[in-house]
Image: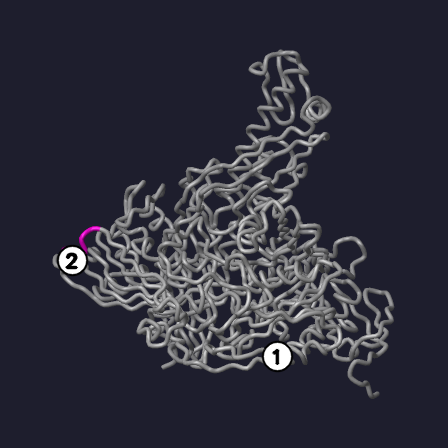
Amino acid sequence: MTYVGKPIKRLYDDKFVTGKSTYVDDIQINSLYAGFVRSPYAHARIKSIDVSDALKVPGIVAVFTAKDLQVKEGIGIWTTYEDPKQWKFLPRRPLAEKEVKYVGDPVAIVIGTDKYNVRDAIDKVNVDYEKLPAVIKMEEALEDKVLVHEELKTNVAFDQTFNGGNVDEAFKNADRKIEVEVTNNRLIPNPMEPRGIISRYEGGFLTIWYSTQVPHTARAEFSRVLGIPASRIRVIMPDVGGAFGSKVNILPEDVAVVLSSIKLGRPVRWTATRSEEMISSEARHNTFKGEVAFKTDGTILGIRGELIVDMGAYLTYTSPIQPVIIPLMIPGPYKIQNISVRSKAVYTNTPPITMYRGASRPEATFIIERIMSNVADELGIDDVTIRERNMITNTPYVNPLGLKYDSGDYLGLLREGVKKLEYEKLKAWAKAMREKGRKVGVGMAFYLEISGFGPWEFGEVRVTETGDVIVTTGGTPHGQGGETGIAQVVADELQIDIDRIKVIWGDTEVVASGMGTYGSRTAAAAASAAKVAATKVLEKMKKFAAKMLKVDVEEVKYSSGEFEANGRKVSWNEVAEFAYKSDEPGVFEQLILPGDVTYPYGVHIAVVEVDDYGIAKVSEYKAYDDIGVVINPALAEGQVHGGATQAVGQAILEEAIINEEGQLAVTYADYLIPTAVEAPKFESYFAEKPHASQYPSGAKGVGEAALIVGPAAIVRALEDATGKRFNHTPVRPEELIE
Amino acid sequence: MLVRPGEKVKIKVKVNGIWYEREVEPRKLLVHFLRDDLGLTGTKIGCDTSTCGACTVLMNGKSVKSCTLLAVQADGAEITTIEGGDGKLHAIQEAFKDNFALQCGYCTPGMIMQSYYLLSENPSPSEEEIREGLHGNICRCTGYQNIVKAVQDASRRLRA
């Protein structure tokens, strides 16, 4: 039996359905509890902090402020993908020292024996603040009247213009031009498990249990920040209850917990409340203002404009990605040759931004798809035709900003997808319904995604004495089911039963190295590293079989658990046992597989209905994607469902609302996450003839696709339903109601 | 009963068939009692505000959000958590596995307990009734379609 391409059941579900899953807060270990005193102001000077009352609360062990917790360096940015030289920023310290910069900025850490007493003590820490003028809106921050960081002398953290082709010439040659303003408002990733950490320091060695998606990267960053060699730090990723990119981020609170555990010589733990999770990790929030030059036949000649990206009060580990990647991906799957985008990232006195599912590709896709539909409306062309007219027809292709699209038939997929998803039929149905008075609409959008994100991934395959196989991966699945996909690939490579494979990940002392799971990269990068390691292990097994059969290795043939030469056979298990007892106990191979970016693409369709109160419901959501080789269609489909549901959130429900004082609305009563009632019915298909990536697994990735394209498809459907025009997310009921 | 600050109250609660007698602070939430005092960490905490349903358990047969109840309110009650099975997987648990109804798994215990309650009240719910019945349980990963399918599947299995 082969596994790749089949909807194989997830390997490790039993613990999740029986309550034996172990997320970081479930770990039972004798430890102290930490909690944080947070700023009530968006911007203020800390005049003094009095902890004496807090220390009188029974069970309180310590209250530390900035002066108590010194680091070697502040938290930096993700240098694998981000260039610090392009940025003006101050590395983040664990606690605010002189000034608080946003509501929720941690000022002191309270540590005690009981989580309730810690909360009591937090209320008894007296901080004397002198309130300072704050700047909340990014447009105002650009004026530099109020500075978030006095030392930087400006709020502009990044300012770079991305040029391709000759945009002035394009505008000269254009028949028409229009102005566009496209905004993605602020979101909150909101994984169901709030982040958490347990830190134990013993005998010069640090052990950190951490709700993260990048244990090795976190270890390196903790090492740099604390000045402790990485070899003395062990980061263990237990079960992680969702992350969506937000748990690549390393928080100042995390560093404060680790430092406290070192200082006290006792294990310390912190689990964020939902409110703390919401303050810790926010996303998107950017606006593109520009103009588009086009011909009357719909050919788009050029795009120019300015992108403003809110960073919140500090750079986080992952926020610098967006201002760089958004411009690069604006041309998308279209042969637009001339582009000029000035991208500015700006500090505001608001909670910091982090990476969130798609990070920059949702924005780029929303911008270009809004441009396509805006131009279509301007010319009275339909959504499919305008895209056909502009679509790239040959790959590989280099876009005007230098990105090399690897493989695909974008135009073919558009035509195939529109047919398969019955777009025209739905459009006609919606029109007929509208004539009867119902506000229903159908929208489509296309995306080209950049995923895979090298530079490499780690894989190890080991055959045990019984012939069972342990796969150790640098990928870090946390819900996607990547472990099952990796096992499928290895099972096929070794031609063994999948139940004989155990996949291990997420512990820096068990996994030699690793990048992790983010950027839709695991099926491409991690599965491929495991696949290549498996191929090499099989070669080694052949060598042992040759020894047993007393033949040259070239004579050995392997098929489905049997090695054969000259009519004699030895089984996989016999070879494994033989190898184990000879000079290689546990045949294994480990390697770092280099890799590059790859480009999945697809077309998605949304059907919406708006009621008399302006409440929109996405009733159906349909997807047709080319994600390269599909390792497990059921898991891939799950990613489309989940991503599209977050897209429903982004398009009509979710917005991180911050008032003029900088106070974020911090509960699920204010931040509306789609439930089973708001979620649409899904149909998801994958291209029959996929275009493989360069990765040995052939996969391109699917984790982010639906959230990249979904908001554009849903907003287009809302336009169809109401006849109004929206170039932003979310579209609110008051805008939909007449 | 008057309980002064810092004082504890004795409660007796039957959890998954076993009686536990413990002294608790009156302000202790039921979910913390289950997780911290009894070590039953299958019940999760997702939002602190009774919105997400990760902490759903059964109290005297009815589904409740254990972050909204105090442990003292469960005095004398019978609680069933996700760990309350008989060692074999329940039809709902099997159906969740078979239908890819979980991804990160964090909402899963609450979702399964709510599904159990839903099916005990209405053994053959329609799709809309299932969606309404799970309205108080947030899943951020799956988009719910496979959860709905799992509940339909479990309903069939339980009636077979």
Residue A726 in view in this figure: yes
Q: Secondary structure at mark 1?
A: strand
The amino acid on which the numbered mark 2 sits, given as a three-letter code, is: Asp
Please name whichever residue, A455 or B86, is drawn nearer the observer in this view of the structure: A455
- Residue named by callout 2: A168
Q: Quick check: A655 left or right of A289?
A: right
Question: Tag 1 or tag 2, which sits nearer the N-term?
Answer: 1
Residue name at image x 62 percent, y 75 percent: B49
Disc 1 residue crowd, few under 14, some 14–19, many 20+, Cα 10 Å:
some
Left or right, A515 with reference to A710: right
SS state under label 2: helix
- Kindly identify which residue carries mark 1: A50
Q: In the image, residue A708 lies at what x, y percent?
A: 42, 58
Number of other residues with Cα within 10 Å of mark 2, as a class: few under 14, some 14 to 19, many 20 or more: some
Seen in the picture, residue A273 relative to A557 is either above or below; the reply is: below
A615 or B9, which lies in front? Answer: B9
Can residue A432 be seen from the camera position used here?
Answer: no
Work out which quarter of the rendered image holds the C terminus of chain A and state it.
bottom left
- Quadrant assignment for the N terminus of chain A: top right
Q: Nearer the viewer, residue B128 or A198?
A: A198
Nearer the observer, disc 2 or disc 1? 1
Q: Horizontal and vertical percent for residue A727?
A: 33, 69
Residue A510 occupies which quadrant of the picture?
A: top right
Question: Marks 2 and 1: same chain?
Answer: yes
Q: Chain of mark 2?
A: A
- Where is residue A721 shown, x and y percent of the image? 36, 71
Query: How many marks are shown on the rendered structure?
Result: 2
Residue B7 position in % (x across, y down): 82, 81
Magenta range is A165-171
- Asked whether residue A153 is drawn in magenta, I would say no
